[in-house]
Amino acid sequence: MNSTNKLSCQTIIDLLSQYGVEDVVLSPGSRNTPLIIAVNRSRALRTRVVIDERSAAFIALGIAVETGRPVAMICTSGSAPLNYGPALAEAFYRRVPLIAITADRPAEWIDQDDSQTIRQPELFANIVKGSYNLTAERGGSVEAWYFNRLVNDALTTALRGPAGPVHINVQLDDPLSGCTDLGAPQRKIECDEPEALLPAETVDRLAGEIASKKTLIIIGFNHPDARLAESLSRLARLSNVAVLHEAQSNVRHVDGAVGNIDATLSVAYDFDASDYTSELVITAGGALLSRHVKAFLRAIPGLQHWHIGRYDRAVDCFMKLSRRVECPPASFFAQIASAAGTLPVAAASSFGDVWRAMHDRAMARVSTFVASSPWSDFTAMAALIGSLPADWNIHASNGTAVRYLQLFDYSRLGRVECNRGVSGIDGSTSTAIGASLCYGGTTLLISGDMSAQYDLGALAFNEIPPRFKMVVLNNSGGGIFRFIATTSALEERERCFAADVRLPLRQLADGFGFAYYRAASAADFDCVFPAFRDDDSRPAILELVTPPELSAEVLKNFFSNK
């Protein structure tokens, strides 16, 4: 097969497919011409072309999150790689294997006022697992071996636990468009990583500790995992264990587990603190959204905290960390559930029942509060979450949208995702669009208006599937700043924080070929949502217009109403 004559590019593209990459998101450029030739002519890789590198990187992230496979992205030199930064940071803290491949000029031309040159090696050193620099080709007997070894090392680093992004910088000299027939396939260096199994005596000892204490298990953001869910269901049956989860944990269907953590803790005043205060908390998955549960756990004296999962650092968010178990959560909880199920639990413990009773009380309170509240962010989100089909995949933007999502009954929803690695509002639309490319059903993005404005460029992508839908909560800017104590009372709030976003969604929908729907009241919502739900001819936007000041007041009332 005919392809680029640049050996470094041949090596990268051949090995990508051998390491499980199927999708490559590329952005046009000149210096990356050899990489574009190589990937576009590869029979093993599927390419997506996205002009904006920042959007391209988040689309790649969405594909990787949805498929569970590594995804590569390719850009030219100069300022282009800098746009990869936000998505790589998210992938690093979310442990997603993105492969950032950046074209570069030869080292001798850097800092020489040549076009599109910056110092690219180690550009992302603090937000990738590894940085690799392939020098410009000069010939020599060891060059092919050197390129092969570096690329094997880069891809192995991205995939082995914990997974994460890597950066491959490729120095390319002129001429850039030369082609040749490909030679033999590249050598792949296999790396076997056996599943971690704890020694039987360790399992028995840890299971015994769990059975003897009031134990709280909390799952943060996570990919769907049937084995993990089944093990957690078994542990939730123990009377001294309560299993808590957030929407983006994707273990919502665990029997006996407790969701809606913030709402649940909002009714804690109705219960005796000694009945729901834990002695041991076990966490797995990524960062927790709930600030209420973090404050609650930090305040418990003598609490023990175990964190489960393969990490390269201690995760001590509650300031109580006493044990790290470097084992995949699904494997750990399967072993523990088998052992703990045969042990006597803490005497007369009703710990799990108390947490479930708190949750039931909270959900009843949410329903009553919605029924008595005016049209606002709170009631609009309640109507939306209650109307969603169970087979839709949900993406939520950071800020207001994902926090409201946690308050309502999300137990019947399909997969729920949010960029909670670094919790930025940038790239939410692009990430959801990337995920929609690989999901056969409907993908819905629930976005705040500020986040939607931040990532408008994503709507220009010309491969958005008709099964992509977007709900924009339009409350005239960053509604969260009208609620949180840090900013809610400042005179700068509206201009400098909420920013009074002007978002012409109807015109944008027309311009980008989206269907457009709008609801500014409960009656409007009931009227337009069925049409929005059933429109499968093209992507669709539903704008929910809510009063900004009243929305903040309603949310404050929910958390202050005793």
Image: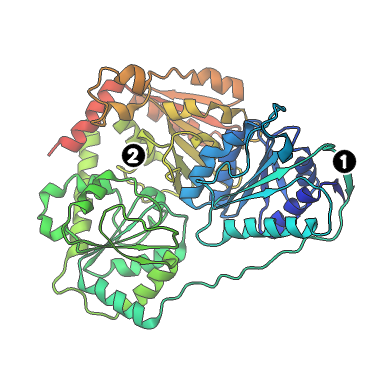
Asked where in the image residue 355 lies, by quadrant, the reply is bottom left
Residue 447 point in image, percent of width and height: 44, 33
Look at mark 1 in the image and give the residue it sits on: 178
Left or right of residue 15: residue 59:
left
Say if 25 sits above or below 554 in the image: below
Q: Helix, strand, or loop for circle 2?
A: helix
From the image, state whether disc 1 or disc 2 is nearer to you. 1
Residue 191 point in image, percent of width and height: 62, 68
Amino acid type at image mark 1: Gly
Residue 257 seen in the figure: yes
Left or right of residue 204: residue 30:
right
Look at mark 2 in the image and give the residue it sits on: 403
Asked where in the image residue 561 lies, by quadrant, the reply is top left
Left or right of residue 43: residue 117:
left
Q: Quadrant of the C terminus?
A: top left
Identify the residue at image location x=37%, y=50%: 287
Identify the residue at image location x=54%, y=26%: 456
Q: Report the residue that reaches farthest toward the right.
A: 181
Badge 1 or badge 2: first in the primary sequence: 1
* Cα gap from disc 1 to disc 2, whole angstroms: 52 Å
Amino acid type at image mark 2: Arg
**Badge 2: few (under 14), some or many (20 or more) residues near its Cα, within 10 Å?**
some
Residue 254 point in image, percent of width and height: 36, 61
Residue 363 seen in the figure: no
